[in-house]
Image (cartoon, grey):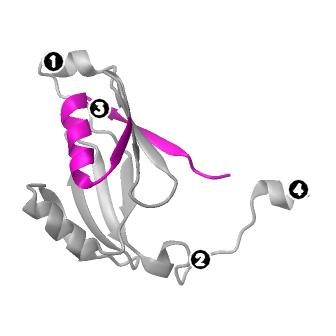
């Protein structure tokens, strides 16, 4: 299987679509309730879906933060973050080396979805602690 896309909630579709376009993503679908983007590299896409909690947001009630974290891989992480900061993006965490051998920067989109820009190199799929397990489908053959 190949991951096709991830859909995350949006509370302000115009602000959210502008945010992702400014980050360098190409918008390929644009409706009042749904937007889809191509990543600058690779074949995966991601989309925004207008949240059903929008009415609570309009009343001033704060919806719970989405627990998902979206990871975007950047080989030139530090340079990308420097460029985004110069464009006015605010980061919760600037690029930081993590104990699990990834370098990550953290920011939030206008709907408060957590985004990690990261670089892990070969450690992304082959960390020193990688286990060799087969999928259930392979083990039943």
Residue 50 is at least partly visible in this image: yes
Query: SS at mark 4?
Result: loop
Q: How far separated are the C-alphas under marks 1 and 4?
A: 51 Å
> Where 126 falls versus 104 (above or below)?
below
Question: Mark 3 and mark 1: span between their CA atoms?
Answer: 13 Å
Q: Is residue 101 magenta?
A: no
**Left or right: where does residue 29 sit relative to residue 59?**
right
Residues shaded magenta:
1-28
Question: Is residue 111 visible to us here?
Answer: no
- Which quarter of the figure has residue 105? bottom left
Which residue matches tag 2? 130
Task: Answer with mark 1 or mark 4, whichever residue precedes in sequence.
Answer: 1
Q: Please name the residue that numbered disc 4 is placed on.
A: 140
> Disc 3 on helix, strand or loop?
strand
Name the secondary structure under disc 2: loop
Q: Do the residues labelled 4 and 3 touch (CB within 8 Å)?
A: no
Query: Which comes sooner in the sequence, label 4 or label 3?
Result: 3
Mark 1 and mark 2 lie on one chain; the one further toward the N terminus is 1
Dot 2: within a 10 Å radius of its alpha carbon, few (fewer than 14), some, or many (20 or more) residues?
A: few
N-terminal of the pair, mark 4 or mark 2, is 2
Which residue: 21% across, 40% down?
18
Q: Is residue 132 left or right of residue 94?
A: right
Secondary structure beneath dot 1 equals: helix
For disc 1, the marked residue is 58
Q: Position of residue 11 (x, y in %)?
A: 24, 28
Residue topped by disc 3: 10
Mark pair 2, 3: CA separation: 35 Å
């Amino acid at each position: 299987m190949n991951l096709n896309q991830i859909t995350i909630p949006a509370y302000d579709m115009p602000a959210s679509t502008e945010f992702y376009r400014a980050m360098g993503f190409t918008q390929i679908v644009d409706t009042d309730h749904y937007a889809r983007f191509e990543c600058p590299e690779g074949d995966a896409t991601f989309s925004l879906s207008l949240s059903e909690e929008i009415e609570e947001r309009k009343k001033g009630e704060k919806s719970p933060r989405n627990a998902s974290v979206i990871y975007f891989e950047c080989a030139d992480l530090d340079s990308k973050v420097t460029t985004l900061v110069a464009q006015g993006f605010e980061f919760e965490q600037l690029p930081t080396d993590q104990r699990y051998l990834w370098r990550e920067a953290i920011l939030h989109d206008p709907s408060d979805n957590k985004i990690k820009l990261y670089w892990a190199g070969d450690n992304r799929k082959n960390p020193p602690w990688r286990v060799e397990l087969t999928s259930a489908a392979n083990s039943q053959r």
